Image (cartoon, rainbow, N blue to C red):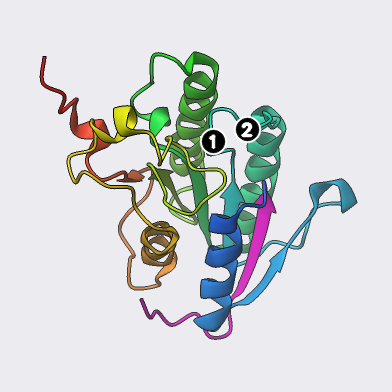
Amino acid sequence: MRIDLDGRSAAIIGRETAVIRAAAAALAANGAATRHHDLAAGMPAPPDVLVVGHALEPEAAPDDHRALISATDRLGEAMAERGSGRVIVLTTAMGLLPARRHGAHAVAAAAVVAAMRGLAMRLGPSLQVNAVGAGAIAGEAEASLAAGSEAMLSHVALGQPGTIADIVNAVLFLADPMNSYMTGQLLVVDGGWSAGYGRNF
């Protein structure tokens, strides 16, 4: 996917995964000056595009989603004070539809989605704040659903895991300057998993 980000800056904060690395590379390939920031080293200057990476894999070591939400709020407020910007939160589709065996992960993801929507309401019209809810991702060590699990994939309408490129294209769509009237939304890229269970009973 090609978008025009020439002259814009992009900051990446949070958990670094293959998806986040690919998103950063795609933003840079489309003209943005892109950097991954370690919050322990201090807050970056307000970027034009902020991408926030939360844990995708239920079994992954939990991150401090509250601290990352707080950092997103502070950076978003600085961006809004400047007058414009995009915040794109990368989370799991379980923020929309919890999975029975991953209660704590689903609760954390739902908190991330609620915080994203609150930030969108608070900082509009200066800022557009949206999220991508990732489903099963092939080739990703931190897939949000077990990509190799036949049991999980039996609930995916398209019958297969997605790719890292599918998630990156959603990030680029939300970063595109032409996407000017969308905020507070969770763009779910999960092959139809959250549309409802497809299992035969």
Residue plotted at (43% across, 35% down): 146
The magenta stretch spans which residues?
Answer: 1-14
Magenta run includes residue 12: yes
**Disc 2 on helix, strand or loop?**
loop
Residue under numbered circle 2: 60
Is there CB contact under 8 Å for labels 1 and 2?
A: yes
Label 1 to label 2: alpha-carbon separation: 5 Å
Q: Amino acid at mark 1?
A: Glu
Percent across and percent down for residue 185 are: 35, 44
Query: Which residue corresponds to mark 1?
Result: 57
What residue lies at 45% left-to-right and 43% top-to-bottom? 120
The three-letter code of the residue at mark 2 reads Ala
In the depicted structure, whether residue 134 falls above or below residue 45: above
Q: Quadrant of residue 121?
A: top left
Q: Nearer the viewer, residue 153 or 99?
A: 153
**Residue 94: x percent and y percent?**
40, 29
Q: Position of residue 34 (x, y in %)?
A: 65, 72
Of residue 28 and residue 149, the one placed in the foreground of this image is 149
Image quarter of the N terminus: bottom left
With 134 as the anchor, is 141 left or right in this view? right
**Does the magenta segment cover residue 7?**
yes
- In the displayed structure, 98 sits above or below 57; it is above
